[in-house]
Amino acid sequence: MSWDRGEVCGGVPGPGQISPKSRIPAQSWDSAQSLSSRTASTSSRRAPSGPSKHGSDSLSVVRPVLPLFVLLLVSPTSARAHGWFTGQTAPTGTAGAAATTWTDGTLYVFGGRTGADAATTATDAVWAYDPCAAVWTPRAAMPAPAVGARAVLGNTGAIYVTGGLGLGGALWEYDPSADTWTVLPPAPTTADGWLPAVVVDPLGVDLHRIGGLGDGDEHLVFDLITETWSSAAPPPQAVVGAAAFWYPSGGEIVMLLGWEGDDASGAASGGAWFYDPATDLWTTGAVLGGPMPTSFQGGGGWSNSEGIYWHVGGSSAFADGAAPFFADAVGFKPAADLWWDASSNAPSPLGGNREMAMAVNAWEEVHLIGGDEGAGPSTRHEIYGTGATDDGDGDGYAECGGDCADFNPNIFPGAAEVCDFQDNDCDGQFDEGFDLDGDLNSTCAGDCDDTDPAIYLGAPEICDGVDQDCDGVTDNACVPAGDDDDSGDDDDSGDDDDSGDDDDSASVFVVAITVPAVSNTYGAGLGANPPFGGDPPPTVSLPPGTGRILTLPAVTGTVQYSGSLPANGGDGTGITTSVSQWADNSGLAGPEVAGGRMLSAVFLDAAAPQDPPPPTFDCGDFTASSFGPELHQIFCPGDGLDGSGQVQTFAVPDSATRIAFGFLDACSSPGSPGCYGDNLGELSVTLQVD
C-alpha cells in the first residue's frame, strides 16, 4: 500500500505571510434534490474486543418517512448564501492530513503525506492556522508521522488524534495551550488504522472510533475521563473514511459517505447512518443522489446553526491520487434525513480534489486544506461558507475582525456613529450620542428636542406653547397643564381625547418611519443589539388612550434576505418561514407561523420584555381584516392590507406605549433568529393610531 491515502492538509508561502483572499460569487442552497427516508436494517453485535458498556445486542430501527410538504417547510431557503473563498495556503503541500478546530477558533492540521507524487512520505508536522489573520504557525510535532489519522476536539479542551496508516489503534492527546503531546492507551484493534471515523459524544464524554481500513464495522469507545476502551454496536455497513459528527438536536452520531467494503470489491458510498449512544442502536438514513451520488476522501463540516453538514469533493475511486476528482458540494440535513445534491450548488472554482484536511471555523465555514488533484500533495486552501474571513465590502474589516455588517462599507469597527437605527461602529449599540435626554428616542427617531425627556415623537401634547409630540404643530390636541383626567379642559365635558375642544372629536396620530432589512424584531425593547444578530428594530412611542386602533396606510420599498434571494415588499414572498424565540428570557412570543420574510411588529410597554411571554400569535392567515395582538406578542402586519386590498386594523393593547417594527430571519427554517448580516433594503412604513 502506498502513502497515497488520507483525509487532507495544505500549505503555500511561508508562515506568517498573508495574501489577500479572493472572493467568488456566493451560491445559495434552495432546493431539495434527493428525498428518501431512513430504512430498517439489522446490526448484529459481534464479540467485543474489550469490555462493553452499551448492553446487549442492538437492532437498527425504521426512521419514519416525512411527507413532502414537511420537507419543503424545512428547506433552508432563508439560510445565508454560501460561496467559495480562498484562504492563505499552508507552508507545505500535504494530502491525507487530519484537522480540527480548537476552542479559541484556531485550526490545527496534523501529519499527512508530503513530497512528489511518485515518492510521498509521511510527516509528523503540525500547523496552526488563524482564520481571521490568515497566519500559519508551526507547532510541536506529533509523536509519530501519520497519514490518514483523524482529529477531534474533546470535552476536556484537548485535541485527540487517532489512527493513521499502519498505526493501528494509536491515540494521542494534544494540548494546544501548552503545545504538548501525551500518548494514551491505544484502541484494542487489529485494524490498520487508516481513516477511521472519529467523533466525541459530549453527553457521555466519550470518543467513538468507527470503521477504518481492515475493520470497517468496528466500533470502539474511549472514555475521556477514565481513559479506558470498550466496544459498542457495529454500524450496519462496514465503512472506511466516513465523515462523522455529533448531531446535538437528535443526541446522535451521524456518519456519512466513505468507502463501503474492501478496496477490491467495495465502492464509494452515498450513505448516511445514525447512532444513538443512549440505546446503542444504529439506523440507516437517506442515500445521496444526483450528479455526485457517492464520495470517498472528500471533506466537509457541520454547521450547527443551519443544522446542515456541508460536504465537498472526493472521488469514486479507492486508489490514492486516482481520478475522478469531484468538485461538487452537497448538504445533508439530519433533522429531515434529507440530502441536497450537487445540482443545487456551485462546484469549487478550483476544480476537483480529494484527501483534503477539513475543519470548521468559528463562523461555521468549512476549510478544505491541501489534498491531491492528481499531481500529488497540494498547497490548496479553499473555504466554503459565507465569507466571514473575507472583507466583502472593502472597508478593511472582515466579519471575523469585528465588522458587524460586512455588506456595508460605511459600517465597521471605529466608524463614526450616525443616527440611522444602525450600529455604525460595531460596538454593540446603535445611535449612541443621539439620545442625550434618555427618553429612549433618538433624533433620527423623531425627537425634536434631545435636551428634554418630555419631548419626543408621540409624547403627550401639553397646552404650553411647546411641541411635545414633535409633529411640527404646537398645542394640537393638547392637555391643559396638570390635567390628568379631563377635568380641566375647556368644555368641562369629560371628553376622551384630552383635546379640550367643543365636539369631543378624537385626535389622529400619524408617523412615517424607515425599517431597514437588518431590523431584528426579537430585539424590541432591549436597547442594544440583539444577541442573535441584526439591529434593534425602529420603535415609535404611541399616544396614550384606550380603544386605540392601529392602521398602516402605506408600506413601500423592498427588502432582500440575501444576495441570492428575490426582493420582496411588506407581505414577503409567500414562502412559509418559522423562526423560534431567540432566548428563554426574551419575554417576547414569536408568531406560530410567519409568512416568508414579511414585515412583523410587536407592541411594548415602558419596561423591557420579561418572562413569561404571552402565547404565540397565529399569523397563518395574515390577510384577515382585523387582528388583536397582545402586548409582547409579535404579529404580522405585512403590507397593512387584507386579502381584498382594504386597510387592516390592529387593536392596540391598552397598556402599550410603544410599537417596534422589524423582520424575522434565520439561517434555516425552522430555526433560531440569525443571519441578518446579508439582508439588504428597507421598507417605508406609515402608521396611524386613531
Image (spheres, helix red, strand yellow):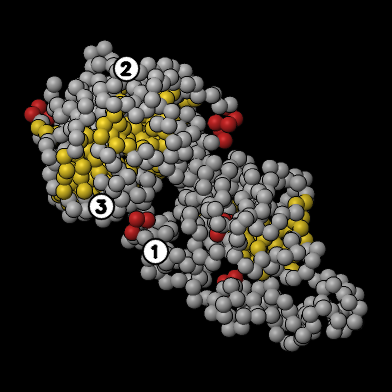
User: In which quadrant is the N terminus drawn?
Assistant: top left
Q: Name the secondary structure under disc 1.
A: loop
Residue topped by disc 3 = 130
| Kind of residue sitting beneath label 3 | Asp
> In the rendered view, does 685 fall on the left or right side of 475?
left
| Kind of residue sitting beneath label 1 | Phe
- Compared with 32, 205 (above or below) is below
Of the image marks 1 and 2, the number of the one nearer the N terminus: 2
Determine if residue 381 is in view.
no
Q: Label 1 crowding class (10 Å Cα cut-off): few <14, some 14-19, many 20+? A: many
> Pointers 1 and 2 in contact (CB under 8 A)?
no
Q: Label 2 crowding class (10 Å Cα cut-off): few <14, some 14-19, many 20+? A: few
| Kind of residue sitting beneath label 2 | Arg
> Pointers 1 and 3 in contact (CB under 8 A)?
no
Residue positioned most to the top = 265
Q: Label 3 crowding class (10 Å Cα cut-off): few <14, some 14-19, many 20+? A: some
Tell which tag, 1 or 2, sits nearer the viewer: 2
Residue topped by disc 1 = 412
- Compared with 593, 5 (above or below) is above
Q: Where's residue 48, x and y in %? A: 29, 21
Counting labels gives 3
Residue at horizontal 46 percent and vertical 54 percent from the top: 677
Q: Nearer the viewer, residue 401 or 687?
A: 401
Of the image marks 1 and 3, the number of the one nearer the N terminus: 3
Mark 1 to mark 3: distance in Å? 21 Å
Mark seen at residue 665:
none
Residue topped by disc 2 = 46
Quarter of image, res 498: bottom right
Tell which tag, 3 or 2, sits nearer the viewer: 2
Residue at horizontal 60 percent and vertical 57 percent from the top: 611
Mark 3 to mark 2: distance in Å? 44 Å
